[in-house]
Image (cartoon, rainbow, N blue to C red):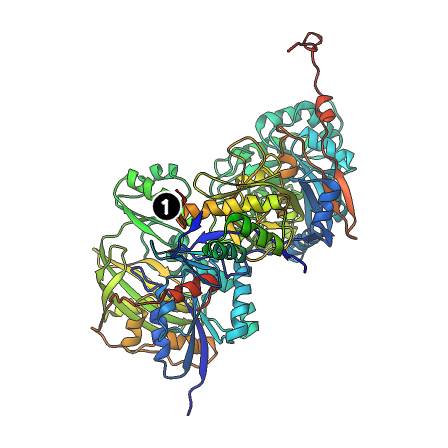
Amino acid sequence: MKKRKLCIAVSGLNAIDSPGPGVAVIRGLREAESFDVRIIGLSYESLEPGIYMHDVVDKTYQIPYPNAGAETLLARLEYIHDIEKLDVIIPNFDAELYSFMKLEDTLKAMGINTFLPTMMQFEERHKVNLPEFGKKYDIKVPFSKSIFSTGEIYSLSNDFEFPMVIKGKYYDASIAYNLEQAKSYFNKISAKWGLPIVVQQFVHGTEYNITGLGDGKGNTIAAVPMRKQYITDKGKAWGGITIDDKRMIDLTHKFVSQTKWRGGFELELMKGQDNEFYLLEINPRMPAWIYLAVGVGQNIPEAMVNLAIGEEVIPYTDYEKGKMFIRYAWDMIVDINEFHEISTKGEL
Amino acid sequence: MEKLRYERPVIKKLETGMPNKFGLRTEYAPLTHIDGVSVKEMINEYGSPLFVISESTIRSTYKKAKKAFSTRYPKVQFAWSYKTNYISAVCNVFHQEGSWAEVVSGFEYEKALRNGVDGKKIIFNGPDKNQNDLKKAIENESLIHIDHLDELYTIIELTENTEKRAKVAIRINMDTGIYPMWDRFGFNYENGQAWDALNKIMRSSKLELMGLHCHIGTFMLTASAYAVAASKLADLAIGIEQKYNHSIKYIDLGGGFASKNTLKGAYLPGSDTNPSFDDFAEAITSTLLNANFRNNELPLLILETGRALIDDAGFLLGSVIANKRTSQGKRTTILDIGVNILFTAFWYDHKITPAQPFTHYTETTQLFGPLCMNIDVVRDNIDLPLLNKGDHLVVHQVGAYNMTQWMQFITLRPNVVMIDMDGKVHLIRENEKLENINSLERVPEYLKKFEL
Amino acid sequence: MKINKNIAISDSGFVFNPVNGESFSVNPIGAEIISLMKTGQAYDEIEQSLMNKYSVEITTFERDYFDFIGLLKQHNLIDTNEEA
């Protein structure tokens, strides 16, 4: 039987040193057994490598930055949909999720499916709200506090011990070992991502990650835990290995069933010296290393698309343990005309 | 052959790290008409700059807010916050819709009376009410919201010489989990100041405790803080019932609802992220409905929201005075709109659109006002089409505070017009003339003559 | 005043300077001016042909033209050697 062909738009094509998940997600989609795909890339910057990888992305359109607002984004998506007839959109950046969630119903009415967290899930898991989140769902989180001015840093020494982690609302995190550093990171990060700044107690230990997919009804459709083996100076995994830790899987099931999480996610965990897992962050989307999950038997991008278009999906329960991913850099040779096309016309 | 429309030549370096706006046609849309009236014609007739108020926007925004609350709670009363915009025509639109008046000074109090508001329907807030103001308010049976103990004692004193009982409420400040905590106004909830004041009021036979009031902050971006405020006020009200067998008539949650403007430093536009009336209403009313008021007698819910009701209805029309470049080559444009009349430019990235159609080519521009001051910046960075001298622009969502906080600095304040429900334009505040300013001045005789 | 000879300009307004690898984007009228400059036309000739084509005051055009040339200079697209 001929597989049906879906037109799927994917963002996060920045397969660079601090990569977006787009290219890895697309690899999963291209290997899907239940459908064929035409891939539409959605890009923000004209040098996102995915734009030029023609065996990965069939056609790319630039879209406006999230700070232009949902209305502007919608106008652009209408234009793209008119030409491409999109079935599904998979947004992969934290900062753009808000706009896509806001447009979810409008897109649905246009015939475009998404599978995103609800606004409540999205807000609740936000760094700023992590302490309440931990309390509500009985999940251990490091002590943290949102602050609005450098003046507040001085009073932090009552509640915190150095080192502390200074985090931006959307991205960026730096470890501060003294007040001066804390102040300087506050200024740097707030200039870029606005207020508040989240100050989090630094937890000594080993970092673990787990990626998964929730169906929105409390069922865990997929869950693959991984330990980073090599971390770049930007804190990104360069290599990692799947592991077999029942406590991590249990924690994931608890997270999904309690929050009724809908969509892909990544949990960043720290195993402290007390041998307990602390939840550092919940990323409301698939991580850049998602292809590892595909490679060990859980095609999360495929399952997510099937959920988005309303297909029945059987949960994955197994995966190969002890499989590794090693990320590598690859220089493409690109004609300037291609750069020219995407730069001036916003399409390639 | 007819000549083509001209656009000035522009070249833009392609920054590889940045998306470029060429090719994306959706960044801005010109606003050529407001409520069907041409921007250009209004400027021709009333000059530039010009404030324009849309009556239909006021009424529809008010109805939306009213509906959000009254579909969730049986007794709701809005009071128009005069300080937000006290041009009489604007106030009266709100009064026609049913709003009482909320004032914070003797000046505003008089203004409300002259607009024809019944003294009983004026809420008198603020830390500065002098003896005369208070006397008038007691006589008119206005609702006096007490800010501090000195005011409370003054009122008690004043009531000794009148038959009338003063109708009072106290303003309460509290920790609602938001920053900064506004604790300079009113009496604190957590440390017992509020009970202290309430006890004094309840023991005086000449004061009638009508309600409880709070105003937790301004431009609130989270509705949940109002739920905390409502629950603390409800808690006090129930405590008064138990202690004094006295039911207060109303709970006043004040204002502070954010409008759809975008605060500087915010990443996403306010139109997407800021809470709606429904969000605020849900937080407040569900808390009050769940509180254990005696016999389920719910107090009247009063709201003094200003900004969120009027911001959208105000537009500021202006014109390009000149285009320049900085020493670094950055495009700057000087407008006839400055921070003297657009005070809110200090904290918002105002939405600004051209008033005539352009091509999709844009230039990143810094917008300056006409003042001879370095702080006179209307927008730091905005992508605008290639504007020419004399082209018109529209600043959106300027209805709140600009027409009360504007300065008469080196120039005169412009006309304000209102477009009525039928699209007819009315002048509602005339531009100032030199005589208006000079008529207030007195030059001593010996300074009248000089030789140069 | 001459535009650098080896500057490449495409129909869609993409300008590439092979000397330093920088790329630019220009609007149609900007592209027209650069193309005319490349053919060696002097300012007067360029002004004449554009004044015939577009509805614009001569003072406005002059001001915009020199502003534009200033930008070209700033971006090293004008051959300053020949000018001297």
Image quadrant in which the C terminus of chain A is located? bottom left
Using the rendered image of the protein, determine whether residue B54 is visible from the camera's viewpoint.
Answer: no
- Counting from the top left corner in percent of width and height, residue A180 is at 29, 38
- Counting from the top left corner in percent of width and height, residue C46 is at 54, 52
Q: Specify whether B89 is left or right of A316.
A: right
Foreground of the two, B190 or B177: B177
Residue kind at label 1, given as amino acid type: Asn
Q: Specify whether B284 is left or right of B90.
A: left
Which residue is labeled 1 in the image?
C81
- Counting from the top left corner in percent of width and height, residue A340 is at 42, 63
Foreground of the two, A117 or A3: A3
Tag 1: Cα neighbours inside 10 Å, few (<14), some, or many (≥20)? few
Residue that appears at 37% across and 50% down: A168
Residue that appears at 32% across and 39% down: A158
Foreground of the two, A279 or A301: A301
Residue at disc 1, secondary structure: helix
Foreground of the two, B67 or B162: B67
Using the rendered image of the protein, determine whether residue B429 is visible from the camera's viewpoint.
Answer: yes
Q: Residue furthest top?
A: B446
Vertical order, B203 against B296 (above or below): above
Vertical order, B308 against A6 (above or below): above
